[in-house]
Amino acid sequence: MAELLEACKFKPSNEFSDPDYKCSHPIERDGLCIFHLPKPTEEQKQVMTHEARMAAEAIEEEFRQAFSKLLEEEEKNPEAKVCEYLYFQFPAICLSERDFKKPLNLSGATFSGEVNFCRANFSEWTNFWKATFKGKADFGQAFFNEWVGFCEITFKGEVDFCGVTFKSWAGFWGTTFSGEADFRVANFIGRADFRGANFSMEADFGRAIFQEQARFVGKIFESRCNFWEVELDEKAKVLFEKANFSQASFLDTNLEQVHFRDVQWPRKGRRQVLWDEFPRAGWWPDYEKVAENYRQLVLNYEAKRDFNAAEDFHIGEMEMRRKKKGEYAIKRAKSTERQWMARIWRGLRVVCEWLNGYAAYRLLSKYGTSYWRGLLVLFVWIALFSGAFLYTGFAPSKENFEISRARGGADPIRVIEYNIRPDATHHPVSFGQWMSDYGKSVLLTLSILTFQKERFYEPANELSQLVLYSAVLVLPAQTALILFAIRRRYKR
């Protein structure tokens, strides 16, 4: 009898740093009580013999009955202020729709099978510190009235927090999500802390609600993470610090209210981008929604005076506007059943994307962000218009001729006009003469650029006059783009 009543000899591992822990429950076998006996996972059961599996399942059933009885006794015991189940080894267990009336401490617990807390009500604080969930964990629509700690724990399987309500502080710092994590429609009324959390597989925060403070700090989102339609209350403060957004999606979430600190965005070349910009297998970007996220990020980063990042996101917004022009062709390509028609529409998509006003804005000044590109394009325009004047014809103005004659020149006004092929009226000239005449055409172009009323050279015919009108429109417009880019850069 004395041997049966001997206390469990379980000792926590060094990672818990709790050498004084003592279990008061009687030994079941191998020096351990029913609560600390290791429970096999489903994968381990698959390789067991039939007898061993039946024995393991018998122990699991015994655990469930003993735990249910223990839980009821402690909740009824007025001397038990906290229901403590430290380092318990749980099998698959269903605790759905249960009302936990006292504080619940499950630190260091291991859940070998699927655990179900769906629609459970936690009236007091709950602590899962350094717990391990080897199977699926379902907290769907659970209600946490006080603070809850999921800190430094590991979810090896799927975890479902869909529709859960965190009324007070919710701590997830140092937590590892190895499986898919679902936080859709979760309601964070109090503070939420995800510092150092690591999402290795898909995480979904779609339509979650943050009403106070939420902190996502550390290396997270190594796989896909959805923050779709997340609702932020006016008093909510959501902080992402040292987070990796290489596969994070924020569609229909207002990013202007979110605080980003030392985060890593995906990159396209040297530009910081959103992951939603890139097409993926079976998914095509919603350019309008992505452009909206980019615009919110522009306002967000400009408010904290990080203008370099704001420019990257401004470019991203303009890129989405440009690509949206080809969206109609993509829809037609998907809807047609004929392959040759689909190829035509896909080809038209590229044409629509690159032959529009946004594409021209991109080419001329990188959407108003690069004055260096604007200057380069201006030099190209000057060279092109100068060449056009050279081959359409121009001549010294009357004022230029009068000045030349006053200085002793007797030559009549000579029209400078080149032709690609020499003919009766166009004879070959030396390279030096061509460069001299081209320099004069450059002076004519520069006089247009600087709005000179009295020019030394004028168009010689209707065609060169048309070139002049074009230059009057194009050159000042390009100069305005340069000034706009300079103002955007140095208004800071």
Image (spheres, helix red, strand yellow):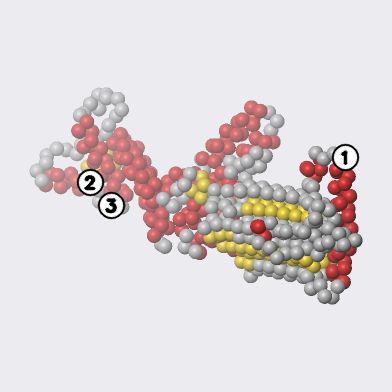
Q: How crowded is mark 3: few (under 14 residues within 10 Å), some or many (20 or more)?
A: few
Indicate the quadrant where residue 465 lies: top left
Residue 338 in the image: above or below residue 186? above
Which residue is identified by label 1?
Answer: 50
Sequence-wise, which precedes: disc 1 or disc 3? 1
Along the line of sight, the residue nearer the viewer: 360 or 463: 360
- The image shows residue 87 at horizontal and vertical percentages of 75, 59
Quarter of the picture holding the N terminus: bottom right
Residue at screen point 79% across, 67% down = 83
Which residue is identified by label 3?
Answer: 452
Residue at screen point 82% across, 70% down = 101
Q: What residue type is labelled 2?
A: Phe
Q: Which residue lies furthest to the left in this view?
A: 408
- The image shows residue 237 at horizontal and vertical percentages of 61, 66
Disc 1 is placed on an element classified as helix
Label 2 to label 3: alpha-carbon separation:
10 Å
Q: Residues within 10 Å of mark 2 (few under 14, many from 20)?
A: some
Residue at screen point 27% across, 31% down = 418
In screen coordinates, is 316 left or right of 150?
left
Label 1 to label 3: alpha-carbon separation:
98 Å
Disc 3 is placed on an element classified as loop
Give the mark toward the camera: 1 or 3: 1
CB under 8 Å between callouts 2 and 3?
no
Which residue is identified by label 2?
Answer: 456
CB under 8 Å between callouts 1 and 3?
no
